[in-house]
Amino acid sequence: MDTSYPREERPPPKRGPPPAAPAPRDHLVWAIFNTLYMNFCCLGFVALAFAVKARDRKVSGDVEAARHFSSKARCYNTLATAGSVVLPLLLGALIVTGVIHLSKLAQESVGFFTYQFSGGDDEDQ
């Protein structure tokens, strides 16, 4: 037994209840943003309703219901954000392709009409 230096005896760590899972997020700010700024097919308003329900359940202590409503709020927020970002991009792409197609069509029609007019001058002589 080595007693050359004093050892500190530490008491064993206290074991308590496991730490509780963090409270679910309610996504309220995201829902307000979707409702006011990018409200696509009223999905932002639906997300706002579920976010408020999630916050109410979280305050009242019903964690499972808060998680359920939080999940729905996140889903509707994601759909509203994706719809509000994808649809303008799709519309812009359609406009660009339409302009390109119309410019090619205009160039071809100009070539066709100039050919018709120049061919008519030879018959008069």
Image: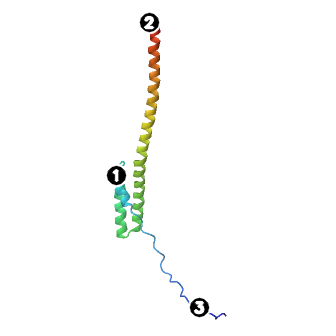
Q: Pointer 3: residues within 10 angstroms few (<14), some, or many (20+)?
A: few
113 left or right of 46 in image: right
Amino acid bearing label 2: Asp
Task: Give the colouring mode of the picture.
Answer: rainbow
Residue holding disc 2: 124
Q: Please tell me whether mark 2 sits on a helix, a strand or a loop.
A: helix
Q: Please tell me whether mark 3 sits on a helix, a strand or a loop.
A: loop
Q: Residue at x 45, y 27 (%)?
A: 105
Separation of residues labelled 3 and 1 (CA atoms) = 65 Å
Residue in front for this viewpoint, 12 or 5: 5
Separation of residues labelled 1 and 2 (CA atoms) = 67 Å
Image x and y of residue 65, in percent: 39, 64
Residue in front for this viewpoint, 22 or 62: 22
Q: Please tell me whether mark 1 sits on a helix, a strand or a loop.
A: loop
Residue holding disc 1: 37
User: Which quadrant of the structure image shows residue 68?
Assistant: bottom left
User: Which quadrant of the structure image shows residue 10?
Assistant: bottom right
Question: Viewer-nearest of labels 2 and 3?
Answer: 2
Q: Residue at x 47, y 75 (%)?
A: 19
Q: Is residue 40 above or below residue 125?
A: below
Residue holding disc 3: 7
Amino acid bearing label 1: Tyr
Kindly identify which numbered label has been placed on residue 13. Answer: none
Image x and y of residue 71, in percent: 42, 60
Q: Residue at x 47, y 78 (%)?
A: 17
Image x and y of residue 47, in percent: 37, 56
